[in-house]
Amino acid sequence: MTAILRFTVSDDDTALALGSGSLPVLATPRLLAWCEAATCAAIEDDLGPGQTSVGTRVELQHLAASAVGQEVEVSARVVHADGRLRRFSVAVRNVVDGEPGKLAGSGEVTRVVVDAERFLSRL
């Protein structure tokens, strides 16, 4: 289970816009959201009817800045599966000349497969 997504940093993705800092660079909360989106894309084909996955644990390092207009590539791949649990390795790279370059972020995201209706009925 793997997925690779590409995003372009916009003004709405910055630390300044999201309230996580004062600079117009990719915000860590948006970096995390994009990593989670990649894990959702990676697990999608593994889900049965009525199933979804929920995030349960995140370990993420934001290693380099990405400016507005910078394209970034976010990859996720399963490194551990046990029953309903899936642990993903995630990496974010700034894209240079169409190719993934400098590592901008890395970490692990854990998701658990759940029955969507049953999960929501417990709220």
Image (cartoon, grey):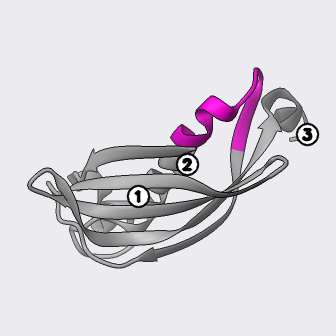
For residue 68, above or below residue 44: below
Q: CA distance from mark 2 to mark 3?
A: 24 Å
Furthest toward the top, the residue is: 49
Mark in front: 1 vs 2: 2
Answer whether residue 49 is magenta in the image: yes
Q: Position of residue 32 (x, y in %)?
A: 48, 61
| Left-right relation of 94 to 28 | left
N-term-proximal mark, 2 vs 3: 2
Mark in front: 2 vs 3: 2
Q: Residue at x 31, y 60 (%)?
A: 17
Furthest toward the left, the residue is: 97
Q: Which residue is mark 3?
A: 122
- Describe the element under mark 1 as helix, strand or loop: helix
Tag 1–tag 3 contact (CB < 8 Å): no
N-term-proximal mark, 1 vs 2: 1
Q: Which residues are magenta?
A: 40-53
- Describe the element under mark 3 as helix, strand or loop: loop
- Depth check, front residue: 114 or 11: 114
Q: Residue at x 77, y 23 (%)?
A: 50
Q: CA distance from mark 1 to mark 2?
A: 14 Å
Q: Which residue is mark 1?
A: 30
N-term-proximal mark, 1 vs 3: 1
Q: Report the amino acid beneath label 3.
A: Arg
In the picture, the disc for residue 39 is 2
Q: Quadrant of residue 102?
A: bottom left
Q: Residue at x 49, y 61 (%)?
A: 90
Q: Position of residue 44 (x, y in %)?
A: 60, 33
For residue 70, above or below residue 61: above
Q: Quadrant of the C terminus?
A: top right
- Depth check, front residue: 83 or 49: 83
Q: Position of residue 13 (x, y in %)?
A: 31, 55
Q: CA distance from mark 1 to mark 3?
A: 28 Å
